Image (cartoon, coloured by chain):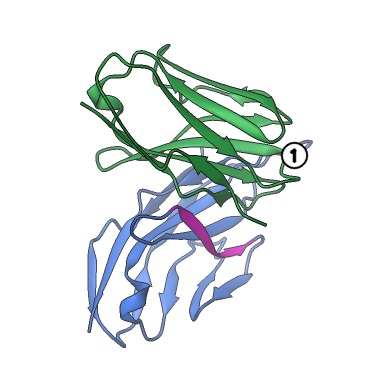
Amino acid sequence: GDSVTQMEGPVTLSEEAFLTINCTYTATGYPSLFWYVQYPGEGLQLLLKATKADDKGSNKGFEATYRKETTSFHLEKGSVQVSDSAVYFCALSDRWSGGSNYKLTFGKGTLLTVNP
Amino acid sequence: DAGVIQSPRHEVTEMGQEVTLRCKPISGHDYLFWYRQTMMRGLELLIYFNNNVPIDDSGMPEDRFSAKMPNASFSTLKIQPSEPRDSAVYFCASSQEETQYFGPGTRLLVL
């Protein structure tokens, strides 16, 4: 079945450092890919998404490119801030032809801590 | 829009008691999902509904768990009887396409 593998961390960075969180996936079809972020004590919220190969999703300085050839969707940010400290989840949609199914498959999450 | 609303936000109960968690999805969303999050197991999908009909309940841990969606604006997740290993944060999410919108969660502690 479909699966998502992401680096588990934790990742600790200093403010203004470059961030990469790796995510690779396995899917039988052509999924959409997502990054969700969970701040302490809150629910998950969508950070960015990409729906087809070579699409780049971006939001709040974060970017990720849908790479079909490497089945990857790595999250990057050029300069992290203390306020970016959170858990980041990579996910894919579970669609099949002839119908729609909006179940998401999530990775295990990566805890990011940014120190001042 | 108020977003997905969950209640209660925190629940502390004793083993053996019945627990009912509630969720109001975003208006117009016809998919509703229940998740459980723990440190050990991460985020697990328990059950999801489409147009108030349960589509996949394969993630429900055991018969002690049940979920209903009597109408488009309300769903419940019930645990009866509760056990300490049910302690977790339970999230409800809704969608009308691929992007799911999560509620703030209910933090459940079973003593």
Q: Is residue A46 left or right of residue A98?
A: left
Q: Is residue B102 above or below residue B79?
A: below
Q: Nearer the viewer, residue B79 or A38?
A: B79
- Kindly identify the amino acid type of the residue bearing the numbered disc 1: Ser
Q: Is residue A50 left or right of residue A76?
A: right
Whether residue B41 appears in magenta in the rendering, the answer is no
Q: Is residue A101 above or below residue B96?
A: above
Q: Is residue A102 above or below residue A34?
A: above
According to the rendering, which colour does chain A have?
A: blue
- Indicate the chain on which mark 1 is placed: A
Residue A60 image point, x, y percent:
51, 78
Q: Quadrant of the C terminus of chain A?
A: bottom left
Q: Quadrant of residue A112?
A: bottom left
Residue B69 image point, x, y percent:
64, 25
Seen as rendered, the residue at the extreme right is A98
According to the rendering, which colour does chain B have?
A: green
Residue B12 image point, x, y percent:
29, 32
Query: Residue at horizontal 23%, vertical 62%?
Result: A10
Query: Residue at horizontal 33%, vertical 59%?
Result: A40
Query: Residue at horizontal 44%, vertical 38%?
Result: B8
Q: Residue under circle 1? A: A97
Q: Which residues are magenta?
A: A43-50
Q: How crowded is the residue under tag 1: few (<14 C-alpha within 10 Å), some, or many (20+)?
A: few
Q: Secondary structure at mark 1?
A: loop
